[in-house]
Image (cartoon, rainbow, N blue to C red):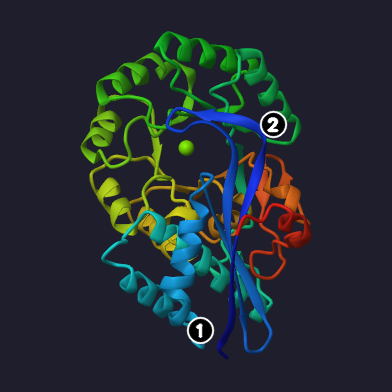
């Protein structure tokens, strides 16, 4: 069995609604880099990563020019070996950033190919713990006025969620507290509420925010400060009084090792599309488990549902409103506040390639 064909495509996809988070400004579209790998038996797999518009071409170029000759003709079942070869090839300019985004698309395609070849869904292939994973609506809503914020929460509840996230990072803490107050009043005491500051604060500002938000029974405050200030994270976790989630901007296993061993996080939140794919994501989940921590996910919920369903320490699946389901045959299945990992082989996503083709940018 050999890798026969590697196709790399970039799509520029519109968001259903322009959204804002503190670190990024308002976003109205995004790039998706797709890797499709076919083996000599005719089996195929696909994997993707997502980035800000204009950045997909660089990642596609890394796959084509950096990884192509490693993959072509190789045994697609030796995923760890292939991952290591790709990592070493780009080591000097890599170890995170665009390189792990490129690795993510290829690695996910290899795992999908593996599942498709064996007719096994990824969640069983990777460990098979429990197909039901608590899911939350990861709303990106910092630019929404309060009523729109609450209307979005109502729609999430109607869609079956019992856990909802909202953004923090308005110009004043008073405004953030007013928005959280309105949301908690709207949801009542029994719906779980997460918050995400997207690196809005310095550590001293974050500490004030943690103390001001202590009495709202928050599941967590996510990314209060810059992602690699591990000392700051440990300080906030020790003295802030609200659990912390972080990890979408950590791009390597070693960065998670640093954050976890600093004692800086309650809910490690790796994103397979930013940290190099399924292979390192599972290592981070096991690292968390070994430290008696849960694991949660960021974005790409249609693939992450499998990874979390494989893990005994799975806590929450973040369900993003990026609208990718508009290009997929099967929507995410929800039951009683949980997402359910599908039993289709591989990751089980059947993309509408014709619909995607209309948005092709490379
Ligand atoms: Mg986040």
**Which of pointers 1 and 2 lies earlier in the amino acid sequence?**
1
Q: Does 26 sit left or right of 152 as displayed?
A: left
Within 10 angstroms of label 1, few (less than 14), some, or many (20 or more) residues?
some
Q: Residue at x 72, y 56 (%)?
A: 356
Position above or below: 270 against 1: above
Q: CA distance from mark 1 to mark 2?
A: 44 Å
Q: Residue at x 50, y 87 (%)?
A: 75
x, y percent for residue 333: 73, 49
Which residue occupies the foreground of this view, 180 or 96? 96
Which residue occupies the foreground of this view, 126 or 32? 32
- The image quarter in which residue 330 lies: bottom right
Position above or below: 326 against 353: above
Residue 194 in view in this figure: no
Q: Does 37 sit left or right of 344 as displayed?
A: left
Which residue is label 2 attached to?
156
Q: Secondary structure at mark 1?
A: loop
Position above or below: 123 against 313: below
Q: Looking at the image, how many numbered discs can be counted on the residues? A: 2
Q: Residue at x 42, y 78 (%)?
A: 82
Q: Nearer the viewer, mark 1 or mark 2?
A: 1
Q: Residue at x 35, y 70 (%)?
A: 87
x, y percent for residue 242: 38, 27
Q: Does 344 sit left or right of 273 as displayed?
A: right
- The image quarter in which residue 210 lies: top left
Which residue is label 1 attached to?
72
Residue 59 in view in this figure: yes
Quarter of the image with the N terminus in it = bottom right
| Cβ of mark 2 under 8 A from ligand 1 | no
x, y percent for residue 151: 70, 20
Position above or below: 98 against 35: above
Q: Does 6 sit left or right of 208 as displayed?
A: right
x, y percent for residue 249: 39, 45
């Amino acid at each position: 069995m050999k890798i026969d064909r590697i196709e790399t495509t970039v799509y520029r996809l519109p968001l259903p609604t322009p959204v804002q988070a503190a670190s990024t400004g308002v976003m109205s579209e995004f790039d998706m880099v797709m890797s499709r790998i076919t083996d000599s038996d005719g089996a195929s797999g696909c994997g993707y990563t997502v980035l800000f518009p204009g950045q997909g071409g660089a990642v596609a170029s890394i796959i084509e020019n950096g990884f192509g000759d490693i993959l072509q003709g190789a045994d697609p079942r030796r995923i760890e070996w292939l991952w290591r070869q790709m990592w070493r090839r780009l080591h000097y300019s890599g170890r995170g950033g665009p390189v792990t985004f490129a690795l993510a698309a290829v690695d996910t395609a290899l795992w999908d190919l593996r599942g498709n070849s064996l007719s096994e869904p990824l969640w069983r292939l990777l460990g098979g713990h429990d197909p039901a994973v608590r899911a939350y609506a990861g709303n990106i809503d910092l630019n929404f006025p309060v009523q729109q914020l609450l209307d979005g929460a109502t729609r999430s509840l109607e869609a079956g969620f019992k856990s909802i996230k909202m953004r923090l990072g308005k110009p004043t803490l008073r405004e953030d507290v007013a928005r959280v107050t309105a949301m908690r009043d709207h949801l009542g005491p029994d719906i779980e509420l997460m918050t995400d500051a997207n690196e809005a604060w310095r550590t001293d500002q974050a500490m004030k925010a943690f103390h001001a938000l202590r009495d709202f029974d928050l599941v967590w405050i996510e990314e209060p400060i810059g992602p690699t200030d591990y000392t700051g994270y440990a300080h906030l976790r020790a003295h802030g009084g609200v659990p912390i989630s972080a990890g979408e901007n950590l791009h390597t296993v070693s960065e998670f090792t640093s954050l976890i061993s600093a004692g800086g996080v309650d809910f490690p939140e790796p994103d397979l599309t930013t940290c190099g794919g399924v292979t390192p994501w599972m290592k981070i989940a096991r690292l968390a488990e070994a430290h008696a921590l849960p694991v949660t996910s960021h974005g790409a919920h249609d693939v992450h549902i499998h990874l979390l369903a494989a893990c005994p320490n799975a806590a929450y699946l973040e369900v993003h409103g990026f609208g990718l389901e508009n290009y997929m045959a099967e929507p995410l299945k929800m039951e009683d506040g949980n997402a359910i990992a599908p039993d289709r082989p591989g990751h089980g996503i059947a993309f509408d390639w014709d619909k995607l083709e209309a948005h092709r940018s490379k």
